[in-house]
Image: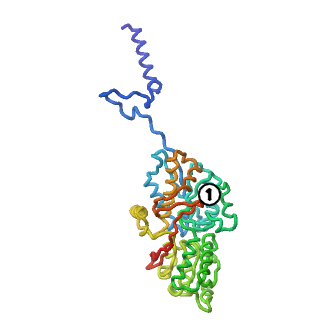
Amino acid sequence: MNKRLFALLSVLVLASMVLVACGGAAAPAATQAPAASGATEAPAAATEAPAAEAITLKIVSSLPMTGSSLTQTQTIVNAMQLRLEQANYSACGGAYTLEYEAWDDASAALGKWDPAVETENANKAAADTAIIAYLGTFNSGAAMLSIPILNAAGPLTMISPANTNPGLTKADKDLPGVTDSRYPTGVRNYSRVVAADDIQGKVAANFVKSLGATSVYILDDQELYGKGVADVFDATAQEIGLTVVGHEGIDPKAADYKALMTKISTSNAGGPPDAIYVGMVVDNNASQLLKDKFAIMGDNEKVKYVGPDGIQTQAFIDGAGADTAEGAYASVAGVALDKLPPAGLQFVKDYTAKFGNLTEPYAVYGYETMNVAIKAIEDVCAAGGDPTDRAAVNSAVFAIKDFDGALGNWSFDANGDASLTDMTFYQVQKGAYVPVGTFK
């Protein structure tokens, strides 16, 4: 071979090597011919096209993570994280990565949920188009602020593990037109996995009567949730023949309630009523109210003390003291943890293994809320849709029917209410809430 020909061939070889290195000469992996039978195949990394990067879908929760409610809300957040972990933080065969952030809608200044903070959270979620589900809120008053903001943003679906005010979903349970006005797009975007107060208040009144009470004094914290459940209790009590001796709102910031309890102690023909029903959350001085009731009227056997799920938390018992709280009752939607269906019992087992003993009943509702969000995403994918589309995810939430979840088999109705109606009453016994009966 002469030197000029050798030089030319060398240049051509070098040029071909450069083209291959730049990706210009080799055929794409998907179109390359398979290796001949018996031939040695190239390493997969060298021949396979890189997998497409998963798209991130963000889910946020907005719950009071500051103040007395933390004993409940931390277990809700734990349960949501557990469900995501079980899903390997992915959906739709790995095409989407699920990212979760737990937001606080409370402030140190108030020591409970703060309207300004919740509004800020809702606006922040509305502006972040990667967020496709907003899990919350815990307080019904907070939901009333967020629903219209999120409704106008897609709508962005909102799934609550704890809101119970009927008027959030049912127009006939609120002032005319108020419920519908919260949904400016005309499309519902708010749902909840917990039974509303039109069930809780009604069952509570019947429960108090079943304890042998014939008279009751009703108190509430003047918030949407507390007053709402107290009003339903009031109406039902009168329907079933319980004498409502009085019904008034309290100041949640009062130093003490001894004057109020002194008045109640002589309100029923010179003596105390058979029972006191309090519509409130633990953050609103619930423990102090019970301590002053105990100081004036004695233990809870003499004058029954009953409340809704807002006081069914260990923080309420600890704040009042175990001896003072002994015998008090509180209701929670659903069945007791040890009476959950198989999926629910497995949740309790998994939760306990990861986070320790579970006593707060709302944890399973947090788990189910995340369960719903993940199912909606998967259902959108299964139908060939795009789970980055907020409206598609929201529609999938409302389409959930006959879902076998941790709470049992249930469905959402057109308003966003779950078909679950069981209510369990708990009594404080030796410093802890113990289930004493489940009612329809």
Relative to 81, does residue 289 appear above or below in the rendering? Answer: below
Q: Residue furthest top?
A: 2
Is 90 in front, or is 398?
398
In the rendered image, is residue 355 in sight?
no
| Residue 159, image x, y percentages | 56, 59
Q: Which residue is mark 1?
A: 188
Q: Residue furthest left?
A: 38
How many labels, in total? Answer: 1
| Residue 136, image x, y percentages | 56, 61
Residue drawn at x 41%, y 28% is: 32
Q: Secondary structure at mark 1?
A: loop
In the rendered image, is residue 26 in sight?
yes
Residue drawn at x 45%, y 39% is: 51
Relative to 282, does residue 348 appear above or below in the rendering? Answer: above
Is 274 in front, or is 325?
274
Colour scheme of the picture: rainbow
| Residue 386, image x, y percentages | 55, 45
Q: Residue furthest right?
A: 176
Is 114 in front, or is 392?
392
What's the amino acid at mark 1? Arg
Q: Residue furthest bottom?
A: 270
Q: Which image quadrant: the N terminus?
A: top left
| Residue 250, image x, y percentages | 63, 77
Residue drawn at x 48%, y 65% is: 363
Q: Residues within 10 Å of mark 1 (few under 14, many from 20)?
A: many
